[in-house]
Image (tube, grey):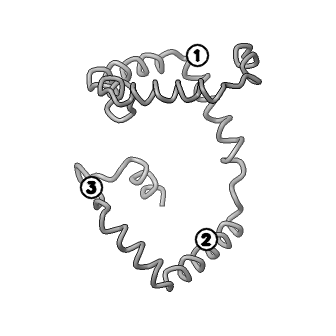
Amino acid sequence: PEYRARRAKATVSNETRKRLSEAMKAKWSAGDYRARHTNNGSHSAERRLKIAEAIRRKWQDPDYRNKTVLGIRLAHKSGRYAERMSPEATAEWKSKISSSMRERWQDKMYRDQQLRSAQGRPSRPPVRGGAPPRRLATAAAER
């Protein structure tokens, strides 16, 4: 956009950068600013329900639905999805990674460091409801 083109070659002096940095650090040290701008917990349960309802209403509109589905399909046909490796290349790549990791784990220092760091990590939470996620159930049904 035009506003970015105007700023493309703009530079900020070190003094200005320092002043901006100090201002932002002061804001982030204040609890209310941090609470408003953090990703985890930034929306209340009520707000999340409102967002979900708005999206449900949007999907009822055929124009919005078609435009969005088309965009998703185009994204899957281009970029990283289109550049997936062939099964042979994937097998070779996995084999290289496997042998490399096997070699690494033979190194006592690497193994000890990995085991120490794993001790501090929480274990996976239990599956709620007992039913597998939908994508797993669908994949199992297709087999």
Mark 1 or mark 2: name the one nearer the start of the chain.
1
**Depth-wise, is mark 1 or mark 2 nearer the camera?**
2
Counting residues from the start of the chain, the first of labels 1 and 3 encountered is 1
> What residue type is disc 3 on?
Pro
Residue 38, horizontal then vertical, whole percent: 38, 31
Nearest the eye: 21 or 132: 21
* Apparent side of residue 42 relative to residue 104 in the rendered image (left or right): left
Mark 1 is surrounded, within 10 Å at the Cα level, by few (under 14), some (14 to 19) or many (20 or more) other residues, namely: few
Mark 3 lies on residue? 125
Q: Is residue 88 above or below residue 52?
A: below
Front one among 58 and 62: 58
**Secondary structure of the residue carrying numbered label 2:** helix
Q: Say which residue label 1 marks.
A: 63
Q: Quadrant of the N terminus?
A: top right
Disc 3 crowd rating (10 Å Cα; few below 14, some 14-19, many 20+) is few
Label 3 to label 2, Cα distance in Å?
28 Å
Between the residue at mark 1 and the residue at mark 2, the CA separation in whole angstroms equals: 42 Å
Depth check: give the residue in front, 95 or 61: 95
Q: Provide the residue designation for mark 2.
A: 94
Q: Residue at x 68, y 73 (%)?
A: 92
* Residue 127 falls left or right of residue 8: left
Q: Name the amino acid type tagged 2.
A: Lys
Determine the residue positioned at 37% across, 74% down.
115
- Give me the residue at 41% from left, 54% from top: 136
